[in-house]
Image: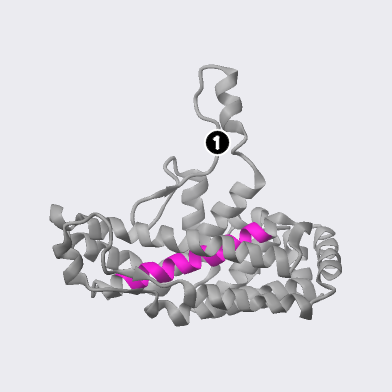
Amino acid sequence: MIGIKGLADFQDRFFNIVKGKSAELIKGNLDEELGSGKDFPVSIKADFCLLINEINALKGAGSLLEGVTKDLQNDFKELINSTSFDDFVDNFSELVTVDQLKKAPDVLRGIVHMETGLVLSFVTVLKNFEGLQMEDYAESLNQYFFSRDGYKTVSGDLIMRPRFPNVRNLEDARGIGNQINAERYIRDITRIVSETAGDALYNLRPRYVRLVQQYREDSRKKLIGWFDSFGDLAEASLLPAVEGIINGAFNLNLNPLVAAAIGTFCSVTARKATEHSYLALLRIM
């Protein structure tokens, strides 16, 4: 069962690389930005080569896992035969240690069952950040599924579950209905897992409040807006690279939802580290 274990090792290594490089991702001259009068950065730079180079180095893993496709097929067959959530966790335990997964809150149990990519995301976070428990995710995911507004990120953006709006005719409904699919749910839930972990790991929520309080003048509002802008840049830079390597080195055409989950986890993990690095540049610790 080297297939899923190989993916778990890939994600675990990436998580630790990002955490270790988080202080180096954003550099620049704050005084120069405040005096520039421009809406875009003139001195602050984001250096994601530190992460992309590490991802590209993992291309060689493909040659070490020549039988990964067959192994993954066998792994998935065993997981698919799981008749309950606990049975699924027991089968997964043969590949990766997932003891804490049995403590998953009710809102997660039905979703996580059979979703290998989500399990790997939880395992990575719980393994590397001992302060987090499965219960810590319950409130975030309950917001996503049950709150009208959805899950609210650090800066107030909303992650809303896909659903049919009130429409006037069938044609309008068809236009929105195609957004409701498995990949959308997997990416949203994986994002919330990564957001919840990153916020706690870097203490981002109280630091963001201090950012808003410190730079509320109109001339400095751009520094607040750039919190999201640099995060967006991190995801745009990392997501294609991660998913490209996973699909190439690990031959995951077998299950694109796994690639979507792992790619989203890695890119949002990089986003949270970038938000931390940006706030550190602004001397908000």
What is the three-letter code of the residue carrying label 1? Answer: Arg
Give the quadrant of residue 204: bottom left
Quarter of the image with the C terminus in it: bottom left
Decide which of 151, 168 is in the foreground and name it: 168
Q: How many marks?
A: 1
Does the magenta run of residues contain 266?
A: yes
The picture quadrant where one finds residue 211 is bottom left
For mark 1, give the secondary structure.
loop
Q: Position of residue 186 (x, y in %)?
A: 61, 53
- How many neighbours does mark 1 have within 10 angstroms: few (below 14), some (14-19), or many (20 or more)? few
Residue 167 in sight in this render: yes
Q: Residue at x 30, y 59 (%)?
A: 226
Find residue 253 and report its horizontal and vertical position in percent.
76, 58
Majority secondary structure of magenta residues: helix
Q: Position of residue 141 (x, y in %)?
A: 51, 54
Chain part drawn in magenta:
259-278
User: Which residue is denoted by mark 1 in the rendering?
Assistant: 163
Q: Is residue 4 above or below residue 222?
A: below
Relative depth, front residue between 215 and 120:
215
Query: Compared to 88, does 189 lie above or below?
Result: above
Asked whether, in this view, residue 137 is left or right of residue 6, the answer is left
